[in-house]
Image (spheres, coloured by chain):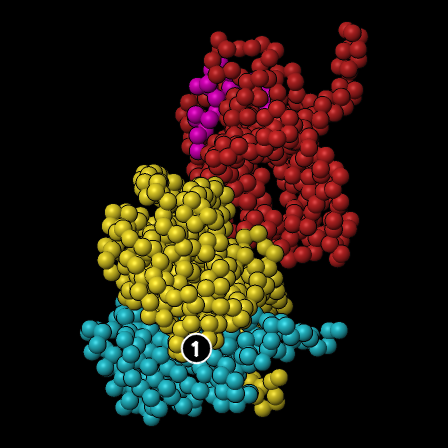
Amino acid sequence: MQSVLSVLDQEPIRFFVSFGVILFLVLNLAAVLTMAERKVAGYIQLRYGPNRVGPRGLLQPLADVFKLFTKENVSPNRADMWIFLAAPIAMFIPAALAWIIIPFSPSAVVADLNVGILFFVGITSIGALGVIMAGYGSRSTFSLLGALRGAAQLISYEVPMILSLLGVVMLTGSLSLVEVVQAQGGGFWNWYFLPQLPMFFVFYIAGLAEVKRVPFDLPEGESEIVGGFMVEYSGMTWALMQAAEFASLALISAMSVTLFLGGWQPPIEALDLGNFNWAWFGLKTALITFTFQWIRWSVPRLRMDQLMNLGWKILVPLCLVWLFVTAGLMLVFPSLGQ
Amino acid sequence: MALAMPEGDLQTRLDRYLTGFRNGHGLEESVIEGSAVKLVVRPEIITAVMATARERLGVRHLSFITVVDRRGSFEVNYELLDLRGARVNVKTVIEGEEPVIDTITSVYPSANWHEREAYDMFGVAFKGHPDMRRIYMWQDHFDHHPLLKSFEISTKRTFEGLR
Amino acid sequence: MLSEERHVEPSDQSALTQPAAGRLVSPDIRDEFGLETLDMNMGPQHPAMHGLLRLILELDGETVVRCDPVMGYLHRCQEKIAENRMYPAVIPLTDRLDYFANMHNEHGYCLAVEDLLGVEIPPRAEYIRVLMCELMRLASHIPSVGFLMLELGAFTPILYSFRERERIQTIFEAVTGARMMFHYIRIGGVKADLPEDIPQKIWDYIESLESNFQRDFVDFIQGNEIFISRTRGIAKMTQEKAIEMGVTGPGLRGTGVDFDIRRDYPYSIYPELDFDVITDTEGDVAASYRVRIAECLQSIRMIKQCLEKMPEGEVMGDTGRRIRPAEGEGFGRVESPRGEYTVHVVSDGTDIPYRVHYRDPSFCNMQLLQEMVPGHYLPDIMPIMGLVDPVSGGWDK
């Protein structure tokens, strides 16, 4: 037993095994989150949500997956098949890949990169490519509009998102996510969401926009462009896109927890669970994910020009101002930078 | 910016409308019935009568246009409201199987779709209409006007050129 | 059928036949880079279109430069069917017109035939009719608000509003036996008296609605910053323009024209009821929403008055065994939730109507789309649809 574990702990093997585990987790996450979303929607909207398959409807994701697997994959006649079929993959891979840098607990991180935040920013930007491929490959007007909106939105909101990360990087002095979390130990008053509150809001809002959720679901735009870039997809290609959406939703939640809410750190020292501290991480991530869903079922959608106004005229200046404030405070109180 | 609503009580307004129409045009019939001024005019002057109603008398709202197929002639009813209780009902009769009448869209822009509907359902053509297309029925290959009395419900519909 | 000399050429001023080039938002860019507009077909199978409407759009970026509504996908030629049925047998057809305000359709048709017949309606029947119509108005206005939110991308308010509609439908079911296609208002009165416990049930329901109304449909929606920014200034029109386009109902009252058939062309017992005509000054989508919300409260007021004043007595007037009006014309004009709904019945002295014409507010208000949509962004079409609030069965007859 011990020897098996030690073999697994050796480098290339450890990486592949843990990456497999992450992939498994992400794929299942999509199913679980679909279920959670529908249940949350149900309770917000005075109905039950799925409650037929299994106890309290808990086996619904299984039924969904089974349905999607057996569904025919319909594609438009004029579609550019290579791009059309590659798009869901191009969306899913970055969403899944970014998970390898998320520290679940001090020891449970697939790759503790010393440029973790940079990796996160770089790899999630590729997601925009998938959106454009999907919209262009389908060759339908609705898809095209959705893709153009998606490209504009994702690229614009990268800017406030990256800027909002810089405050944390300045405070920590490191791009490694493990070190970011370790710097936040010792109780919830040490978490970065307090000194970096505006940055946390900006990251949260930009994250909402990055994962294309209400009120920023313009690329999908259910009521005017009927699903936007994914309107022509069906069956497993569609499911893969959905999985990518949910994986990136959970990814953004996990990132905001890691960067601003102390990652695996318990709120107070007394609640330290030792090796089980990943439970704190999971709990906080679930909470953030729930707020995403709460927002989704409560507010209407912004318009494109309003979206751009919010991004460029409010979020970016706010970030820049707070960067200067942070820098100034660090200059005055050198102890902040540790 | 607020719109001036017609003044005075119902009866004086009705009288005013009636004299206004009588002075301006040669009417075939004109009476006051209840809260309505009922006119029968010749089809040639319909646009002028409508212009009088809107521009001079301030009857602003076109309620609807009804065409009635009288088997050999078409009766076109224009119902106008002054928004304060008075109605103006203008009736005109077009003779013949293939009726043409002047459009009133230049006076009441909202007549646009009402006239398209009348054209679609009865084949009444409106001269000078900006957009005289069928509104409900098929644009191509369907050469019937379903509300004509000669169009029986059991008529076998034909789509010329399609089969 | 259309001979050569009768073929009418569209005049040159037509906004529809002209290329949209003159109205582009950025014509110079188009010249420089050879950019073109994008033609887009919205509907008839579109999840957010009210029923089966097809819009042919021309887009310049996200800006609509041309909007051409195409109708007829639900056309049943109701008017032709009505010409082949006896007078009472037309009532169930009118239910299928504007299927969100069935009571008003029936009421309008019955008023028209009663106008022809000159028959006396028992007062209790009049009160029941108005009671039902006002409940119907609630059941139509509240989901309209929900639809507006749905089109803006918020899914939850529609379910809140359908909860209320559901409860009203339960009342209708108890009264008429049907949930949507009632066939309840008859020529000369109503089909049956109210069941004994229904007035109390309506009262209880109205009380509960009143207590929840502010929370569910005003605070939840009107307090939302995104809702305000999406609807304020959209489809803003002057009073002149609104009347010119033939708009009636909340859209017109939103511009400030206080025109309400219930007050200005009174029918039934509306002169005896105490209610206000709601107007707003802005004339945009938000204004029509506010008018709808305030009208719901007025409907609640009227329902209470109806229940309090309801006289005893018969519910069916004496129309004779066969309904055979003399030759002539009858008009029935009611204020449906969407605006002026008028039925024009022409009789030739037989027991089959010679011609029935419906002036449906959905149809007439829809002309607004052609005029108002160009110049707005593509996503703004949806709130404008929320202002017009058309129903497929209504515009397609």
Tell whether A336 sits left or right of A118: left
A4 or C342, nearer to the observer: C342
What kind of element bears circle 1? Answer: loop
Q: Which chain is rendered cyan in the image? A: B
Of all chains in the rendering, the one displayed in red is A
Query: x%, y% of residue B161?
Result: 73, 77
Farthest front residue in view: C321
As shown in the figure, which amino acid type bears the numbered disc 1?
Gly
Locate residue B2 relative to residue B107 in the image: left or right: left
Most foreground residue, C19 or A151: C19
* Residue A183 colored in magenta in the image: yes
Q: Colour of chain C?
A: yellow
Q: Please determine whether, in this image, residue C124 is positioned above or below residue B81.
A: above
Magenta stretch: give its range.
A177-198
Q: Is residue A306 visible?
A: no
Q: Quadrant of residue C233?
A: bottom left
Q: Is residue A8 above or below residue A65?
A: above
User: Relative to residue A25, is residue C323 depicted above or below?
Assistant: below
- For mark 1, what is the residue? C349
Q: Residue furthest top?
A: A2
Please tell me which residue is depicted at 65% across the width and 18% down the height of the picture.
A108
**Can residue A85 be seen in this snapshot?**
yes
